[in-house]
Image (cartoon, rainbow, N blue to C red):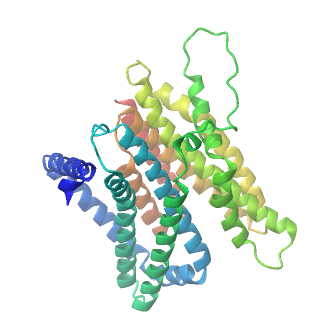
Amino acid sequence: MLQRHPLLLAEWLAARNLLGRAKAHAAIVLAVGLSGLGALAVILFTFAARFAAIFNGLLDYRVLTVAAIAIYAAFAVGGRRQRSEIRYTQFWLAAAPVRQYSRTLAILVVTLLPLAGQFVAMCVVFAAMGVVGDVEATVVGRTILWVGVATVVGAAVGWWSARRSRADVMEGSRYVGAVSPRTETIPSAAALSGWPLAQVRAWGRPENLRILVLIPALFAVQAGSSALHGLSVIAIWVLGGYLGGLLTAVSQTARAASNWLRSTPISFAQFAWALTRKALLYQVVWTAIAAALLIGLGAPWQSALYMSTLWLTIVVLSCCIFVADSYRSRPPHVRIALSFATLAVVEARAHGWSIPLAALLAAWHLRAGAKT
């Protein structure tokens, strides 16, 4: 079959080459894999008593569960299809006489295969949670069924929505402010601080926000609530989406800035501070506003303060890992996963101790970046 589809054959050869390079570092790959499995086992046994309540909550609020998973699948599939189509126009086989059917099949496989892998991994994790937490098999099966339905529906919507032309997709955002003219000629890295904010504004087009924020927000407003209560809930959703998007923008802009400035003698301290200072300031300000809204909705001020502090701790740790690994040209996913697995275990054992531990981990990652 692969002989009749050159693009799929090329992807298969690239995957085999990647596996071949991984075999040369088998010890490192094995150590990382065993560390991940060990961290997962610790998390499973730590939170085993809460798994029954988690499954019941997912089934009780199945509408929100299905909506969240479908939205994720739609955005993942749509974005990956667009990137695949652009990639194949610049592929080394772009001039080859490949049939349209073969090209579409290659895009379909490359687009859906990562999502299918994530779904299988989630099913394995749910099964492990059911075994460790002594949850009934029917409850776990119903949860997996709803997750599968949401994944299929979201993938179909994402594939269909990505059919528009690349000119529409790549259109310059109408919501990014114009660059103010400068008369200075001295090189400065201060402009880096505005990159994450500009990226979030570029993402914040109405056609993106209407699905990502408003539908879950409207489902979260209970019947009989006042208009002020409903608006406050929607404001919390909007702020949460903005803060999460800003954190994701720091990761993406850090990689882009690292690639762009790799040949320059910029120091790590200058790179990290210029890239994150405005993003961190906005995180602090909008987190304080979100905490005030939670208190206005009736949440205890101690809980609101704790949640705000925990979120800011997560933001600082994530930003430190993003800028340190981007500066060193390393992927941050393993360090992110191990760091947050450690924080989850510590928080489950001792309430509140994850905050100072996160500060220590952030300092350690910054030191590693500064030593590069």
Q: Is residue 67 above or below residue 200?
A: below
Q: Is residue 313 visible?
A: yes
Q: Is residue 55 left or right of residue 307?
A: left
Q: Position of residue 204 (x, y in %)?
A: 65, 47
Identify the residue at image location x=53%, y=47%: 248
| Picture quadrant where residue 261 is located | top left
Q: Is residue 306 visible?
A: no
Q: Is residue 242 left or right of residue 12?
A: right
Q: Is residue 204 left or right of residue 154?
A: right
Q: Is residue 19 left or right of residue 51?
A: left
Q: Position of residue 128 (x, y in %)?
A: 35, 78
Name the one closer to the observer, 6 or 117: 6
| Picture quadrant where residue 136 is located | bottom left
Name the one closer to the observer, 291 or 29: 29
Identify the residue at image location x=41%, y=29%: 259
Q: Is residue 40 above or below residue 128?
A: above
Q: Position of residue 209 (x, y in %)?
A: 66, 54
Q: Quadrant of the N terminus?
A: bottom left
Name the one closer to the observer, 112 or 51: 112
Q: Position of residue 165 (x, y in %)?
A: 54, 45
- Number of labels in the image equals 0
Q: Is residue 240 above or below residue 129?
A: above
Identify the residue at image location x=54%, y=32%: 275
Q: Quadrant of the C terminus?
A: top left
